[in-house]
Image (tube, rainbow, N blue to C red):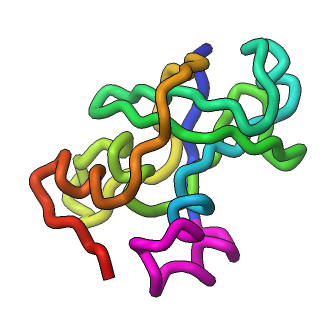
Amino acid sequence: MKAILNTGRTVPQGEAVEHKASPTYRAVVSVCYMNPVDLMELGITEGAHVAVTSRTGRIVLTTWTSEGVSRGEIFVPLGPYANHIIAPETHATGMPDFKGETVDIVPTDEPVKDVGSLMEEIGGLRYDH
């Protein structure tokens, strides 16, 4: 399924941001909010894993339903998971486009990686504090 990726801040993400190595932080930023009808079209239910692939990366996320997300769109909270699929171009503004990226979404049985593994995957350091 093709979709438009939008990202942004969420209250749960903000509450957990000081504890980025915690299971709580991972749980609130490794999600993909989707319209319930789109979930039905993919043949999955809330809590299923999906692989989200953009032109710059691929990440596995857990689905959460949201009536506030339009059909054909997904919302991913800002953070290490969204950063894997956001294109790095800034168009001379210093900020990448956090909205409007076209992505492919497919159901998967793959697990969602922990934050430390994501950081290592891109050449960074685990933050286990």
User: Quick check: 57 left or right of 32?
Assistant: left
Indicate the quadrant where residue 36 lies. Answer: top right
Residue at image x 87%, y 24%?
37
Residue at image x 56%, y 17%?
106
Q: Does residue 34 sit above or below 13 in this rendering?
A: above
* Residue nearest the observer in this picture, 124 or 86: 124
- Does the magenta segment cover residue 29? no
* Residue nearest the observer in this picture, 72 or 82: 82
Q: Does residue 79 sit above or below 69 in this rendering?
A: below
* Image x and y of residue 109, in percent: 55, 22
Indicate the quadrant where residue 59 lies. Answer: top left
Residue at image x 61%, y 14%?
1
* Image x and y of residue 35, in percent: 81, 35
Extreme residue toward the left, this view:
123
Q: Which residues are magenta?
A: 9-25
Residue at image x 59%, y 72%?
13
User: Quick check: 20 left or right of 33?
Assistant: left
* Image x and y of residue 46, in percent: 79, 36
* Image x and y of residue 85, in percent: 37, 40
User: Quick check: 53 left or right of 41?
Assistant: left
The quadrant of the picture occupied by the C terminus is bottom left
Q: Does residue 37 sit above or below 76 in this rendering?
A: above
- Does the magenta segment cover residue 13? yes
How many numbered dots are placed on residues in this image?
0
- Magenta stretch, main secondary structure, is helix
